[in-house]
Image (spheres, rainbow, N blue to C red):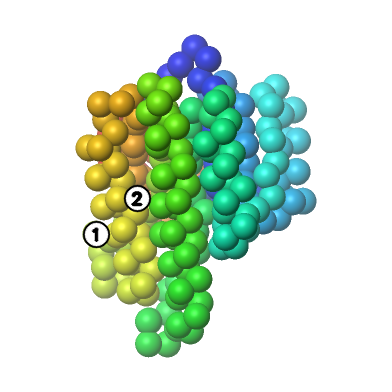
């Protein structure tokens, strides 16, 4: 997928890892960026590096998506900023300990971030993109839903939601010009983050709904 003037991409969880690489790759594709995370110093450093390397505008948006008031501010940006044409939902937390050995309050916080925040941001973005006739939503899930006996069951359940939710969104919004892709990365030891993001974007270019790098 490419545009002569692609517009802006809002990326969550962007202070490091997968989302930071998405930010760099999308800037090189011509997108201006809004990068969202809790850690201002990391965001500022990433923004400066990307802006210096690519010349693209990079806005830093400090927010904890596990907090309702911060989440609401990002939702408002997605609804109101007409320059945004892409949402990359990457923010999330993982868990590897078995459910019975995990703290239930931490499991609830994980559901809030991995499921509720992603859902609310998508609900903010998709109608706005549809009204403008184009846009893309990339949801970062995991291979966990197709191998549900490997990790914590609550974590796997959150990623299964992301997969199913994305598939439903694809069918609902395809006729409105809104692209939906869900990316299912594996462990970093299997594929380095840069290669994973490149594979994800290649899948986007090919029109894939589900991409397993």
Return the x and y of residue 170 as percentages of the image width and height. 27, 38
Q: Quadrant of the C terminus?
A: top left
Q: CA distance from mark 1 to mark 2?
A: 9 Å
Check disc 1: other Cα within 10 Å, few if <14, some if 14-19, many if 20+.
few
Kindly tell me whether residue 55 is visible in this rendering.
yes
Q: Which residue is most to the top? A: 4
Q: Are marks 1 and 2 in contact (CB under 8 Å)?
A: yes
The residue tagged with tag 2: helix, strand or loop?
A: loop
The residue under the point 42% across, 87% down is 101
The residue under the point 71% across, 29% down is 51
Residue of label 1: 146
Return the x and y of residue 143 as percentages of the image width and height. 32, 56
- Give the number of marks: 2
- Of 160 and 17, nearer the camera is 160
The residue under the point 38% across, 21% down is 133
Q: Quadrant of the N terminus?
A: top left
Check disc 2: other Cα within 10 Å, few if <14, some if 14-19, many if 20+.
many
The residue under the point 40% across, 35% down is 127
Residue of label 2: 184
Q: Is residue 84 left or right of residue 172?
A: right
The image quarter in which residue 142 lies? bottom left
């Amino acid at each position: 997928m490419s545009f002569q003037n692609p517009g802006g991409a809002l990326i969550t969880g962007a202070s490091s890892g997968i989302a930071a690489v998405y930010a760099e790759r999308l800037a090189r594709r011509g997108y201006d960026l809004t990068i969202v995370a809790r850690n201002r110093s990391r965001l500022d450093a990433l923004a400066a590096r990307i802006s210096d390397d690519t010349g693209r505008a990079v806005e830093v948006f400090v927010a904890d998506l596990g907090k309702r008031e911060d989440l609401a501010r990002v939702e408002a940006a997605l609804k109101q900023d007409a320059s945004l044409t892409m949402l990359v939902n990457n923010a999330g937390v993982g868990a590897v300990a078995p459910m019975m050995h995990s703290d239930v309050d931490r499991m609830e916080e994980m559901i809030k971030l991995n499921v509720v925040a992603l859902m609310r941001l998508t609900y903010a973005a998709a109608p706005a993109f549809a009204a403008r006739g184009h846009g893309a939503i990339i949801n970062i899930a995991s291979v966990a839903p197709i191998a549900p006996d490997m990790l914590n069951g609550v974590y796997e359940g959150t990623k299964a939601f992301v997969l199913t939710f994305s598939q439903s969104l694809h069918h609902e919004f395809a006729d409105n010009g809104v692209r939906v892709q869900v990316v299912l990365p594996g462990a970093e030891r299997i594929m380095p983050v840069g290669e994973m993001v490149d594979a994800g974007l290649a899948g986007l270019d090919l029109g894939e709904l589900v991409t397993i790098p």
